[in-house]
Image (spheres, grey):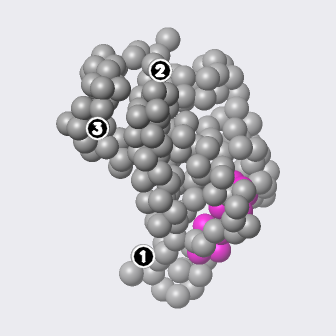
């Protein structure tokens, strides 16, 4: 059973009344998490910023139109972010890789790191949307299995199974290397 944050519930109630302080607090509280999630999924700073901004714009539109999040604000925000990430990949055939070079790396180490990063990112893109989602929530955002299950509207055993299958699929796609 996922615990519903009572502070979040109160904040959502105030946001439904379009309380400016509540809206500001929601943005301050969740923007960084949404950005990290979008960045983990896309690997692009500007795309992650656009997605995070769009999530909060859609929240405002939903609140103004009388279609606000019903129960969990955090789950709603991540659900919107997930849909926007999927939309991004549908509209883009390929995303650019982030700069992952450490200043002390040699050119050979940089090349190997970039190649490895590219291989992993390519392998992740070959997973199902649900497998990508569970990995992003569990490892990208550090959500618990219970939180992930709640956000994905699945049971805890289903999330555990989905995570296991995703990791195994990655291992297979990457040729049994250490992740």
> Marks 2 and 3, Cα distance to the nearest angstrom?
16 Å
Q: Position of residue 16 (x, y in %)?
A: 35, 26
Q: Quadrant of residue 26?
A: top left
Mark 1 or 2, closer to the camera? 2
Q: Position of residue 166 (x, y in %)?
A: 71, 41
Residue 38 colored in magenta in the image: no
- Quarter assignment of residue 66: top left
| Image coordinates for residue 152, horizontal then vertical, percent | 60, 29
For mark 3, what is the residue? Answer: 23
Task: From the image, give the main secondary structure of the stretch colored magenta.
Answer: helix
Marks 1, 3: nearer the viewer: 3
Residue 13 appears in the picture as rendered:
yes
Q: Secondary structure beneath disc 3?
A: helix
Q: Which mark is residue 70?
A: 2
Precedes in sequence: disc 1 or disc 2: 2
Residue for badge 1: 102
Query: Which residue shows up at 35% across the image and 41% down it?
Result: 30
Q: Position of residue 136 (x, y in %)?
A: 56, 45
Please name the residue shown 25% across and 42% down the image. Answer: 24
Closer to the camera in the image, 117 or 176: 117
The single residue placed furthest to the bottom in the displayed view is 107
Residue at the limit of the structure toward the top, as seen here: 1
Left or right: 168 as drawn, with respect to 20: right
> Which span of residues is magenta-colored?
114-125
Q: Is residue 32 left or right of residue 118?
A: left
User: For the point 64% across and 68% down, which residue is it?
Assistant: 95
* Cα distance in 3D space between marks 1 and 2: 44 Å
Is residue 85 or residue 175 the one in the foreground? 85
């Amino acid at each position: 059973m996922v615990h519903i944050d009572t502070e979040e519930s109160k904040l959502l109630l105030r946001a439904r009344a379009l309380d400016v302080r509540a809206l500001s607090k929601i943005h301050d509280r969740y923007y960084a998490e949404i950005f990290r999630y979008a960045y983990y999924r896309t690997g692009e700073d500007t795309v992650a910023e656009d997605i995070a901004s769009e999530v909060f714009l859609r929240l405002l539109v939903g609140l103004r139109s009388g279609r606000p999040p019903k129960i969990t604000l955090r789950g709603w925000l991540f659900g919107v972010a997930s849909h926007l990430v999927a939309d991004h990949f549908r509209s883009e055939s390929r995303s650019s890789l982030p700069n992952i070079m450490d200043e002390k790396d040699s050119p050979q180490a940089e090349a190997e790191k970039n190649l490895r990063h590219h291989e992993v990112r390519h392998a992740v893109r070959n997973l199902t949307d649900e497998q990508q989602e569970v990995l992003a929530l569990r490892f990208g955002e550090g959500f618990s299995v219970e939180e992930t299950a709640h956000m994905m509207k699945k049971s805890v055993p289903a999330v555990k199974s989905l995570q296991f299958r995703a990791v195994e699929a990655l291992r297979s796609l990457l040729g049994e290397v250490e992740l």
